[in-house]
Image (cartoon, rainbow, N blue to C red):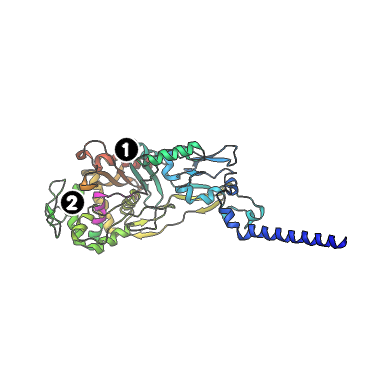
Amino acid sequence: MTRHIRHAALFCALLLVALLVNAARVQVIHAEDYEASPANRRAAIVRYQQPRGDILVDGRPVTGSRDTGEHLRYERTYRNGPLYAPVTGFASQEYGTTLLEATEDAVLSGAAPLLQPLPLWNEFTRSRSAGGDVLTTIDPRAQRAAYNGLRGRKGAVAAVEPSTGRILALVSVPSYDPEPLSGNGRTARETWARLNADPDRPMLNRAVQRTYPPGSTFKVVTAAAALDAGVVKGVDRPTRSPDPYLLPGTTTRLVNGAKECRNATLRDAFVRSCNTVFAQLGVTTGVSRMRRTAESFGFNDPELRIPFRVAPSTFDTTVDAAQLALSSIGQYNTRATPLQMAMVAAAVASGGQVREPYLVERTTRASGGTVSAAGSGAVRRAMLPATASRLRELMRGVVEDGTGRKAAIPGAVVGGKTGTAQHGLGNSGMPYAWFISWAQREDELEPRVAVAVVVEDGEGSRREISGGGTAAPVARAVMEAVLRHE
């Protein structure tokens, strides 16, 4: 009898060892496999078991959380969803996260270690901290002015504060409402299919994710390079430029849309937007100096984050002389995001310095305590201070006496540059209308806002589309919204 008991005990011990070995195999050796398994819903249930932190604009939340009472309990909600979608992105139980919802997900979901009351606290208690909040730099008045200005047309607006790099507006139209994507049911799937099938691509953030030929707005960069290089000795000296201009090494003649461009001064050429003058200036300045200036403004930078990724704006450095001529007037392979061109205007406004743009002012715990705050961003010198002063003068001339009159604001000093960019096979596409600008009150010492506007589908015929007529009024509305805010 004793022998049978010993055998049973030994067998039970072997079973216990086997159970422990199997538990170790499951929990240690194959833990990552089980955790990554699509059948494992535990992580998702925990993630959506509590409300998500909010994204704030001017101290007010533009997001929220709704209790559904289901296993994935809380779904994301959005206030003025289409207005702020280019800033917030979406947070979907089915399709993940984008833009700020993605880059700040750890804070918003409560998973960030800095949200824990003590180091490793959540690991011991198997809990998750309450979601933190993300405070943006967006000015709601500027955002609304940009959105209303573009409504009904396809395009984008970016506005920054020149002295800091704070992004004041980031608008892309057409936009979309992120809220129907928040869940994991039929509504989310149907909305996803509809948005992705839309040829206007409403989920594309045109302000930072799409590049355009900048057209004549790039002449600000070309003028800066030529002035810094000493190719132009003064803004009122004749430039010895022909009209038309024969592109080097070709039989192609470059012409102007404006009159009186032959041998024009830099001041007159800038106000009239003479292609021939700036094409020749770019060739005379040379690829090396043009590249150096363009890159100091931010072109060819694949690492720009605000904190989500910004598509690189490009200035081709492998061009021949004829291609360089076209690149210098914002055509050929020169491409820019609206945010990049806002940075160009901001550099002129801030004395030649380029400050890295940023969208998040600070992140906080649910209790209000600061987790992180924006510090002084990187600063580059795009041009000499004297060159920036001359360019401010030239940009003021565009608004006061040139093609940018519709951007003028009573009681304010405004500088701008218009642009109409050709694109498509044989330039068959509807031209893009550009306007970049900066503004300050007459009683202020420095500009408070720099803006870039691009309109893809301006109203009217091809000849009627222009940066001054189509894009400048939108920029004016944004600048007014900032200047009028106390």
Q: Nearer the viewer, residue 54 or 476?
A: 54
The residue under the point 54% across, 45% down is 53
- Helix, strand or loop for disc 2: helix
Could you tell me residue 212's position as x and y percent?
29, 49
Where is mark 1, residue-wise? 153
User: Which range is magenta?
Assistant: 208-223
**Crowd rating for badge 1 (residues with CA inside 10 Å; few <14, some 14–19, many 20+):** some
220 drawn magenta: yes
Q: What element carries label 1?
A: loop
Q: Which amino acid does label 2 sit on?
A: Asn
Pick whichever, 444 or 258, lies toward us. Answer: 258
In the rendered view of the protein, which quadrant contains the N terminus? bottom right
Membership of 202 in magenta stretch: no
Q: To which residue does mark 2 refer? A: 275
Which amino acid does the dot numbered 1 rest on?
A: Arg
The answer, for residue 232, to whether it is visible in the render is no
Asked whether residue 28 appears in the rendered view, the answer is yes
Q: Where is residue 18 in the image (x, y as percent from the top left)?
A: 71, 60
Task: Relative to 455, say whether 164 is above or below.
Answer: below
Q: Where is residue 169 in the image (x, y as percent from the top left)?
A: 39, 44
Cα gap from disc 1 to disc 2, whole angstroms = 27 Å
On screen, 478 above or below 244? above
